[in-house]
Image: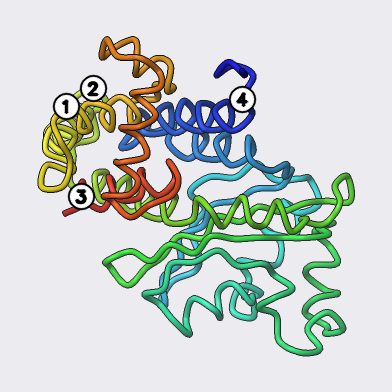
Amino acid sequence: MKTELSDPVAGVEQRFALAAATLIEATGQNNFFPKLICFLQNRVGCDSIVVLAYHPHYVPLVLHEDLDRLDKEALYAHYFEGAYLLSPFYLRWLAATQVSALYRLQNIAPEGFFDSLYYTDYYGRTGLCDEMGYIVPLQNESAVLISLGRTAQFQVYSKHEQQSLHAVEPFISRLVQLHLSMLSKLPDSAQSSTTPLKKQMADTLEVFGSTLLTEKEKKVVQLMLRGHSSKSCARELGISPTTERVHRRNIYAKLQISSQAELFTLFFDALAA
């Protein structure tokens, strides 16, 4: 019989929960986007990242960047001069400003794009071999693009890597929206800005799933959202690991989900509401 530590699925879920919990703690803080990038880089490798704010009437604004040298030069020398107006990511957002999704450049680029002057004049300068981007709509007509670029040091994104990024898209979207909404409402002081957010999270944790879950299942959910593994949940609740796994299966069934990523998405929907 395998122990939990030797169970690869349990190991993956535990690492995801811990990474997500670390990211949650940064919500509303100045280090949120660096933590978000670390979270994504733990899922897939990428070496040229930029987070942009889109608005239909203004030039995009850089919220965070960790760019390869060539990509950075192309961004600041050409992108903000007007190249962004032809960017497939920017155009995809304009076509559906309220849609939150993850896109791959080659899947949204128009026919002939890779032979166009724009591609050779802009992308040819970046050194990128592949790019995927989350587009997250906001309430004030704007949106956030989280671009995950790969230079020639990497292969193009594999199908498995694309699926890994797609799996957390709802979680990423809700968390970015929450982070920016908190920043717009809270004072500049980092210390004072954490208090309302933590209280709101604590209150939501307390009632999350109340209408569907038993008290014991609610406690399991609260521990899962805080980053506890199955074994740790069982130890905290004074139950056997087998019983904890039964609770976990019941939770997934009642909430109509199949993964921790979906659980986090439901939680942030409740938090935003």
Q: Quadrant of the C terminus?
A: bottom left
Q: Where's residue 245, x and y in %?
A: 39, 29
- The residue singled out by tag 1 in the image is 195
Front: mark 2 or 4:
4
Q: Amino acid at mark 4?
A: Asp
**For residue 271, above or below residue 142:** above
* Mark 4 vs 1, N-terminal side: 4
| Residue identified by numbered label 3 | 270
Q: Position of residue 18 (x, y in %)?
A: 46, 25
Q: Residue 71, relative to residue 259: is it above or below?
A: below
Task: Determine crowd level at label 4: few under 14, some 14-19, many 20+ residues with C-alpha closer than 10 A.
Answer: few
Q: Nearer the viewer, mark 4 or mark 1?
A: 4
> Under tag 3, what secondary structure?
helix
Mark nearer the viewer, 2 or 3: 3
Q: Which residue is mark 2?
A: 191
- Please provide percent x and percent y for residue 181: 25, 51
Q: Nearer the viewer, residue 48 or 209?
A: 209
- Where in the figure is residue 239, as x and y percent of width and height? 29, 14
Q: Residues within 10 Å of mark 1 (few under 14, many from 20)?
A: few
Which amino acid, by three-letter code, is at mark 2? Gln
